[in-house]
Image: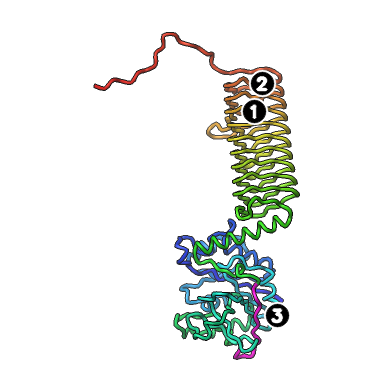
């Protein structure tokens, strides 16, 4: 049976105190709305309708390229009014429609699938949860086991306020029935809003079965209405990521101090110290050790490699048994072979270093091809940019680049060549020879250091 998904994303989120629409705030580097969209995609929905309102253009732009239909709720007159805007986009066929909230990012696909299955295209299915403190939530009113109504907190009677089973805002219903029910909603309540929850009474009146599925945890149905709630869900999400990694054998120094903002895959015997951030797609092979406070994005690190603390790495490939850091920076296009050493305050960009090459401190390699076993001295740089174009430096196997050298690209340093410290090289250096290019040292007798002018 075809599944339609309606995602409500029209709210302003006043308590966020931000110019950013609430659903575009992020958990693990991904917007709240995108988290919900991924759940919808996992379910294999045939049609996804997103209801926008506040900063609608910005919210819609965030989903550019997705197979989504947008409808706008202007003004915002309640959850029922929101779904009313989606009615024209929903077919009359015998289908199921699932209603999700764009500010409830961690809803589990398995939980939602259970809800859709419970609906079965014939019943109204509600996702509920029992809360120790249900303040502010709609209460699920039952007669025996049968669900008879949902009463909003502001409209609840004292005996109803004592009910702990609450409605999470997620429901699945037969599409044709849902369309009829929401179009018949009235706003005769204290808020003068159209409540989606009133469809429960409509279903009961028609004899349509109303069933409830229970959420597995409060976390998966928690909404974001404030920076505090956003931070709490961030930590809950990251804790789940950390637990999954540890169950797979990864050793984390402190699971509370790890952030995975994408996909992190690890081989055996991987160790990760505190405060590390992994973004995009990162793979750590067997025996990799990551030091404290590293930021690694869209990179692959070979077996047995050690990354020392405070290293930043983006779109890089690191070979086996390499050593990187501390305080190193690998920029896009950095490709390090096995047993390469990149030390403190070394930056590598769009460069390939062959096996055993070393740049141990205070150096820059940009747009360079570096041979095997090259020793690249402290303070040396490749001058790869002439103000208009980038140029490449080629350094042959076993070359030695002295300290404080400038290699002005395009230039080639031959295999086994030695460049004397302090040289500025703008012509090719022959293989196996010493090349020195610096001014002659002089000492001037009788020279006096300038003196400060005396005050009048």
Q: CA distance from mark 3 to mark 2?
A: 76 Å
The x and y percentages for residue 351 are 65, 36
The x and y percentages for residue 10 are 51, 69
Q: Tell me, for residue 192, which label it has, or none.
A: none
Q: Residue at x 69, y 47 (%)?
A: 271
Tell me: 183 left or right of 430: left
Nearer-the-camera pick, 281 or 320: 320
Tell me: 287 left or right of 195: right
Tell me: 336 left or right of 449: right
The x and y percentages for residue 16 are 47, 63
State which tag comes first along the sequence, 3 or 1: 3
The x and y percentages for residue 268 are 75, 49
Q: Measured along the vertical axis of the image, is residue 268 above or below residue 200?
A: above
Tags 2 and 1 in contact by the CB under 8 Å rule? no
- Label 1: few (<14), some or many (≥20) within 10 Å? many
Say how many tags the image has: 3
Q: Tell me, for residue 418, which label it has, or none.
A: 2
- What residue did someone put label 1 on? 376
- What residue did someone put label 3 on? 120
Query: What span is colored magenta in the figure?
Result: 204-215
Q: Secondary structure at mark 1?
A: strand
Q: Look at the image and tell me whether residue 90 can be seen.
A: no
Tell me: 340 left or right of 68: right
State which tag comes first along the sequence, 2 or 1: 1
């Amino acid at each position: 049976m075809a599944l339609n998904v309606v995602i409500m994303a029209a709210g302003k989120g006043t308590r966020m105190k931000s110019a950013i629409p609430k659903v575009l705030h992020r958990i693990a580097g991904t917007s709240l709305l995108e988290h919900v969209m991924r759940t919808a995609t996992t379910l294999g929905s045939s049609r996804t309708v997103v209801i926008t309102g506040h900063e609608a253009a910005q919210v819609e732009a965030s989903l550019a390229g997705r197979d989504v239909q947008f409808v706008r709720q202007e003004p915002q007159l309640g959850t029922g009014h929101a779904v009313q805007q989606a009615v024209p986009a929903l077919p009359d066929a015998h289908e199921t429609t699932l209603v999700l909230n764009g500010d409830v990012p961690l809803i589990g696909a398995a939980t939602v699938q259970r809800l859709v299955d419970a609906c079965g295209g014939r019943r109204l299915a509600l996702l509920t949860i029992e809360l120790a403190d249900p303040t502010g939530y709609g209460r699920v009113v039952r007669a025996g086991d049968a669900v008879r109504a949902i009463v909003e907190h502001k409209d609840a009677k004292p005996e109803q306020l004592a009910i702990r089973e609450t409605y999470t805002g997620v429901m699945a219903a037969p599409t044709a029935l849902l369309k009829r029910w929401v179009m018949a909603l009235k706003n005769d309540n204290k808020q003068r809003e159209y409540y989606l929850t009133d469809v429960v009474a409509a279903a009961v009146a028609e004899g349509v079965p109303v069933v409830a599925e229970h959420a597995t945890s409060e976390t998966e149905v928690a909404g974001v209405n404030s920076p505090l709630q956003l931070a709490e869900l961030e930590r809950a999400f990251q804790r789940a990521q950390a637990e999954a990694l540890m169950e797979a054998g990864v050793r984390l120094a402190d699971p509370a101090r790890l952030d995975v903002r994408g996909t992190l895959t690890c081989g055996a015997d991987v160790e990760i110290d505190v405060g590390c951030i992994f973004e995009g797609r990162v793979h750590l092979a067997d025996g990799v050790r990551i030091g404290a406070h590293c930021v690694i994005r869209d990179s692959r690190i070979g077996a047995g490699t050690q990354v020392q603390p405070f290293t930043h790495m983006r779109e890089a490939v690191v070979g086996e048994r390499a050593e990187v850091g501390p305080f190193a920076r690998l920029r896009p296009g950095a490709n390090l072979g096995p047993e390469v050493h990149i030390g403190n305050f070394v930056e590598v960009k769009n460069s390939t270093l062959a096996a055993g090459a070393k740049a141990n401190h205070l150096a820059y390699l940009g747009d360079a091809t570096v041979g095997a076993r090259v020793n690249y001295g402290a303070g040396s740089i490749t001058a790869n940019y002439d103000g208009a174009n980038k140029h490449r430096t080629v350094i042959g196997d076993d070359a030695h680049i002295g300290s404080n050298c400038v290699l002005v690209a395009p230039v080639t340093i031959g295999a086994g060549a030695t460049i004397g410290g302090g040289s500025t090289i703008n012509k090719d250096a022959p293989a196996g020879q010493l090349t020195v290019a610096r001014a002659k040292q002089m000492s001037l007798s009788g020279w006096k250091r300038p003196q400060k002018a005396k005050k009048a």
